[in-house]
Image: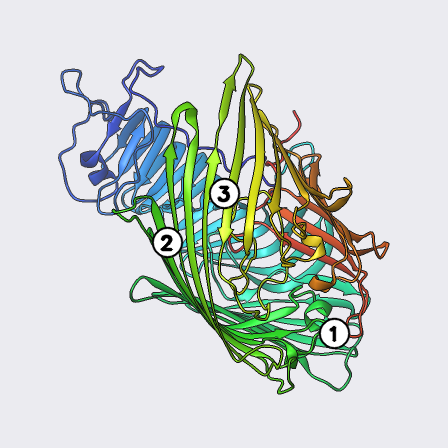
């Protein structure tokens, strides 16, 4: 019969006993190098004995004994023995009794009694025995009785239990140690689950006729293995080889994953991990689905001295597109190059518009491939990128999209001595090309921009802060294949302004209040020629750009005219560790230049009212709301965000409403709700739910439900997802996923909220 697993096979080491009088009235002794040299045959030394007891004389200073276990002993030092009593029987046999502890070459042995036969070179040890091998992840052996060689590397232990990396426990009737690195166990029960006296059956276990642990290869070989769950046999495997818990990277199969979708049917993915060398590995993932779908996925990772590279891809054959091979290839790299720059590489290729969604790979619908280069310093930023964008959105023709584009941007910050303040100098180059040769829809353009900004602050009496603002922007355009615009355009736009801030602060016993009115007056001169709007199609009006010189997101369009940006903010900081803030603002212009669309909130001589509120407390709740109100007090845009993170639950929610705007290619109003939640209950159980609901279409766009059970020995993930959207290339799809991971093999750790506790 195999032995039941212990209730707690990973208890902390017991510290060495301090020097004290034993119950027999004799002194405990620490016999250091001289005694151990004779007892274990390591060198020669004189031996003093009294009635066959090796005891120090009362007039002889006693060796110091540490109150705790010493640090790991270097491998070249002699053994250290601590015991209540050590006796010498004849000239070949030494017996140590009473709380015996031995440290030798990193091994730590504790037992009630150890007998050394010098003639045979063997140690006979009476239990309970605890042997800890070197290293933080070293094995721990617990046994009832043992016969070991004097170096503790070879021998037999009976009634033994082996604990690896404080994770995997193996109980055996007999353990044999060979050559210092081979441990053979017979009639074994292996599990990483906590086993209690009242519930001796673990959640899962592997029973085997024999198990061999090789510390050099870091592998466990099970012979005649039987896998059980709750004591019920589920599978029999004649030979099973697994990495031990100390392994971080080793070739072999990874945990399989089960996924069922309405488009592909029931499918199983079985990844195989292959270590190429210490800096590279390859993962191959065959995936077979019931609806005649076969996929081979691959992931290559390579670490270099200066960076990393990762390549993901797959090839598939299915009935969704019969007779056509499908697949994708994604690659990303990041490298340090001379001059303090970082070089980034990206490659995004896919066979068809629906592949990434069908196989749940990514929700990306515009795939960018190219190179990036950047450097960030205290007073300088340099960014460059060149690449191609492929759209896989329905209704978008790549021939009429600016797919090939290049950008270069440099920003420097300096502080001029003559006029004071802080200035920035930025220059930017942008160029894009469409493959279409048709006029207008095939428009190509190149822009070179030079912009300098300056700001200086003065603090006046009563705490009023006045700032002087100035900007000069020069933009040169080269436009091709569009008869509506000249081929060359040069625009120069100066801007000057003043900003006044007057913060008021009040403190009481319970709270502090800050009120800050801000008024900004700007004048932009020049008479720029019209240019195509390529980069600033989506304009947002919020508290972040209320006092910006231009609210366009791109540099191809710049805000013009004479205008006043007015705002008022109020914030309360409560002693109860919560805060509440509000910002109200509006833009006034002397003339409507028709620069902005309907839904931006900036159209007309007066903008919509911007009202923004925020709330946060010490319990992890954060709430923010932003809305735009027109003169009729009608909402033109509403955005609500909620985040709440607590010990057992987390909620993230967002609501967005925007009126229709043809200038932003939105013919209908946007009315959506986003929800992402997770919660835990009963210690090891947790769940999650996410959805995106479109109120305009009156249906959910996507929904997902997850259930997870995780403790110290196993984690099980079950997921259910539904995609409701459909198009000419994408069909609605329902997916179910299941993955199971056992802790204790290959570095896998249990991920429960806490370790299971046995009932008392």
Visual colour scheme: rainbow
Residue name at image x 55 percent, y 54 percent = 561
| Placement of 101 over or under 336, stated as above or below | above
> Based on the displayed image, in which of its 4 quarters is residue 753 positioned?
top right
Residue 395, numbered label: 1
First-in-chain label (2 vs 3): 3
Q: Which mark is residue 424?
A: 2
Real-space CA distance between mark 2 and mark 3, rounded to the nearest whole angstrom: 57 Å
Residue for point 36% across, 30% down: 100
65 over 389 or under it: above or below: above
Quadrant of the image containing the C terminus = top right
Give neighbour class at mark 3: few <14, some 14-19, many 20+ (Cα, 10 Å).
Answer: some
Choose between 582 and 142: the one closer to the eye. 582
Q: Which residue is mark 3?
A: 166
Question: Marks 2 and 3: which is nearer the front?
Answer: 2
Task: Find numbered disc 3 in the image and state the secondary structure of the residue it sits on.
Answer: loop
Is any part of residue 409 visible from this angle?
A: no
Looking at the image, residue 407 lies above or below residue 715: below
Q: How many marks?
A: 3
Left or right: 258, with 491 as reference point? right
Percent position of residue 229, x then y: 71, 50
């Amino acid at each position: 019969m195999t032995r039941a697993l212990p209730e707690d096979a990973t208890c902390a080491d017991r510290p060495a006993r301090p020097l004290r009088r034993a119950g027999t009235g004799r002194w405990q002794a620490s016999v250091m190098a001289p005694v151990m040299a004779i007892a274990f045959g390591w060198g020669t030394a004189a031996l003093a004995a009294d009635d066959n007891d090796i005891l120090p004389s009362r007039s002889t200073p006693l060796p110091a004994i540490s109150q705790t276990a010493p640090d790991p002993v270097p491998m070249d030092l002699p053994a250290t023995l601590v015991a209540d009593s050590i006796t010498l029987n004849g000239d070949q046999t030494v017996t140590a009794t009473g709380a015996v502890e031995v440290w030798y070459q990193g091994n730590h042995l504790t037992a009630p009694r150890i007998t050394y036969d010098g003639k045979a070179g063997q140690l006979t040890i009476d239990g309970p025995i605890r042997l800890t091998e070197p290293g933080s992840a070293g094995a721990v052996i617990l046994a009832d009785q043992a016969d070991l060689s004097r170096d503790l590397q070879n021998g037999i232990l009976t009634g033994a239990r082996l604990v690896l990396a404080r994770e995997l426990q193996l109980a055996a009737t007999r353990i044999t140690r060979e050559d210092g690195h081979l441990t053979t166990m017979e009639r074994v029960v292996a599990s990483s689950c906590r086993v209690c006296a009242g519930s001796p059956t673990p959640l899962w276990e592997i029973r085997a006729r024999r198990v061999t642990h090789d510390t050099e290869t870091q592998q466990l070989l099970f012979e005649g293995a039987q896998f059980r769950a709750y004591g019920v046999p589920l599978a029999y495997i004649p030979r099973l080889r697994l990495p031990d818990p100390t392994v971080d990277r080793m070739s072999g199969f990874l945990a399989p994953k089960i996924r069922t979708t309405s488009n592909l049917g029931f499918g199983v993915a079985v990844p195989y991990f292959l270590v190429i060398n210490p800096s590279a590995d390859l993962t191959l993932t065959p995936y077979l689905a019931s609806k005649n779908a076969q996929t081979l996925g691959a992931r290559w990772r390579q670490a270099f001295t200066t960076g990393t590279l990762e390549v993901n891809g797959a090839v598939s054959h299915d009935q969704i597109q019969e007779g056509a091979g499908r697949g994708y290839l994604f690659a990303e790299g990041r490298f340090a190059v001379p001059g303090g720059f970082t070089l980034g590489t990206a490659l995004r290729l896919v066979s068809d518009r629906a592949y990434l969604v069908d196989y749940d790979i990514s929700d990306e619908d515009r795939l960018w491939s190219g190179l990036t280069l950047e450097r960030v310093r205290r007073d300088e930023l340099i960014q460059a990128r060149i690449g191609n964008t492929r759209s896989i959105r329905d209704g978008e023709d790549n021939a009429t999209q600016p797919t090939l584009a290049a950008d270069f941007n440099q920003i420097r910050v300096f502080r001029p001595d003559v006029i004071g303040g802080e200035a920035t100098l930025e220059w930017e180059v942008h160029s894009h090309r469409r493959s279409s040769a048709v006029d207008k829809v095939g428009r190509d353009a190149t822009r070179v921009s030079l912009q300098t900004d300056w700001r200086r602050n003065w603090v006046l009496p009563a705490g009023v802060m006045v700032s002087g603002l100035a900007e000069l922007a020069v933009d040169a355009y080269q436009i091709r294949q569009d008869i509506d615009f000249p081929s060359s355009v040069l625009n120069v736009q100066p801007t000057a302004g003043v900003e006044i801030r007057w913060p008021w602060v009040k403190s009481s016993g319970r709270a502090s209040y800050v009120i800050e009115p801000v008024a900004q007056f700007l004048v932009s001169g020049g008479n720029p020629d019209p240019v195509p709007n390529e980069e600033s199609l989506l304009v947002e009006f919020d508290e972040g750009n209320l006092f910006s010189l231009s609210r366009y997101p791109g540099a191809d369009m710049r805000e013009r005219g004479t205008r006043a940006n007015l705002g008022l903010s109020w914030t309360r900081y409560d002693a109860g560790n919560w805060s509440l803030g509000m910002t109200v603002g509006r833009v006034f212009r002397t003339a409507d230049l028709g620069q902005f669309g309907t839904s931006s909130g900036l159209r007309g001589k007066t903008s919509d009212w911007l009202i923004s509120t925020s709330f946060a407390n010490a319990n992890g709740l954060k709430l923010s709301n932003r809305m735009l109100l027109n003169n009729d007090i009608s909402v033109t845009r509403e955005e609500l965000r909620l985040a709440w993170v607590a010990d057992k639950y987390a909620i993230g929610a967002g609501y967005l409403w925007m009126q229709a705007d043809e200038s932003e290619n939105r013919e209908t109003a946007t009315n959506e709700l986003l929800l992402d939640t997770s919660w835990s209950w009963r210690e090891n159980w947790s769940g999650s739910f996410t959805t995106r609901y479109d109120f305009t279409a009156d249906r959910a766009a996507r929904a997902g439900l997850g259930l997870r059970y995780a403790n110290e020995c196993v984690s099980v993930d079950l997921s259910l997802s539904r995609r409701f959207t459909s198009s000419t290339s994408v069909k609605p799809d329902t997916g179910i996923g299941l993955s199971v991971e056992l802790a204790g093999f290959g570095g896998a750790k249990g991920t429960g909220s806490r370790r299971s506790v046995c009932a008392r």
